[in-house]
Amino acid sequence: MATPVLDKVEAESAASPYITVTFRVRRFNPEVSAEATWEDFQLEIDPKERVLDGLHKIKWDVDGTLTFRRSCAHGICGSDAMRINGKNRLACKTLIKDLNPEKPITVEPIKGLTVLKDLVVDMDPFFQAYRDVMPFLITKDTNEPTRERLQTAEDRERFDDTTKCILCAACTSSCPVFWNDGQYFGPAAIVNAHRFIFDSRDEAGEQRLEILNDRDGVWRCRTTFNCTDACPRGIEVTKAIAEVKKALITRRF
C-alpha cells in the first residue's frame, strides 16, 4: 500500500514561516506635495521579524524612495523611533507578531517635530533642548584631575536609571505639552539634566535647576505618564521629573 505524500508545493507552504502583512506607511515628500498621504505595502514576512525588517523590505525591494532613520538596529542608537500602531516605539525592537499582523500595521513619524520626509523628522529642536541643560560633568576644578573622582555605589545608584537614555525622542514626542508648545524642554532633556544634578561628582546642579525653573522647564509637565510608557529603555521618566521639581523646591539634591 502506497504511503500518501504531500504535494511538493503544499509541503513547502505548510513549512513556510511567512505570512502576508500590510504595512500602512505615512508618506510625505515636500518636493511633491504639501500634504501627507498613507500608502499600503503588502509584504511576505516572518512574524518573528521586526518592523524595521519590514521597512527594509519595502525600501530595498518595493520602493527605494521610502525614507527613515536607522543605524545600529539593536535598540542602542535610538535613531529609528517612530509611531507604530499609534504608539512611540523603536522599529528595531518591535516584533511583527506582537502587533496583531492580521490588521494593517501603521507606521508614521513621531509627533511634535517637523517632518522632513516620510518617517524622518527634524531633531534639531530636540537636541538643542538637550544641549541647553548642560549634559556633561562640571566641576569647579578647571585643571585636569590628578586622580579618579571616586563615587560610592549608593551615590551611583541615585542616578543610575537616567543614565539609560539613548536620546531617541520617544518620550519627548509622546508628551501632549510638547505637541502644543515646542518650546518646552521635554522629558528627555529633563532626564539628562537629572543624570548630572544628582551626580555627587558634579558641581553645577544649581545652574541646571535654574535652567529648568524657566517657564518652559519642569513646571510645564502635567504628569500624564506618556513619557514613561513610551521609553524603550524602561526609564521612570515621570519619577525623574518629579525628583527635579522636588529639588527645585527644597534645593536638596
Image: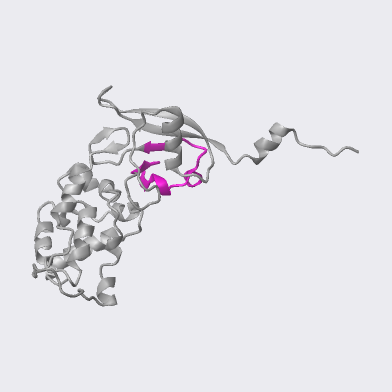
Where 240 falls versus 13 (above or below)?
below
Quarter of the figure with the C terminus: bottom left
Q: Magenta includes 94?
A: yes
Count every numbered label the image shows and give the total: 0
Quarter of the figure with the N terminus: top right
Q: Pick the residue in front: 146 or 174.
A: 146
Q: Along the horizontal axis of the image, is 191 left or right of 216?
A: right
Q: Which residue is drawn at 21% across and 51% down?
A: 186
Q: Is residue 105 visible?
A: no
Q: Residue at x 67, y 36 (%)?
A: 12
Q: Pick the residue in front: 68 or 241.
A: 68
Q: Along the horizontal axis of the image, is 126 left or right of 153?
A: left
Q: Magenta includes 75?
A: no
Q: Position of residue 41 (x, y in %)?
A: 45, 30
Q: Can residue 189 be seen in this view?
A: yes
Q: Position of residue 135 (x, y in %)?
A: 18, 58
Q: Which residue is drawn at 79% across and 37% down?
A: 5
Residue pushed farthest right?
Answer: 1
- The part of the image, by quadrant, that contains residue 210 is bottom left
Q: Along the horizontal axis of the image, is 139 left or right of 22?
A: left
Where 131 falls versus 15 (above or below)?
below
Q: Where is residue 177 in the image (x, y as percent from the top left)?
A: 21, 47
Give the residues in magenta.
Answer: 81-107
Residue pushed farthest top?
Answer: 32
Q: Position of residue 24 (x, y in %)?
A: 42, 33
Q: Pick the residue in front: 247 or 25.
A: 25
User: What colouring method underlies this structural image?
Assistant: one colour
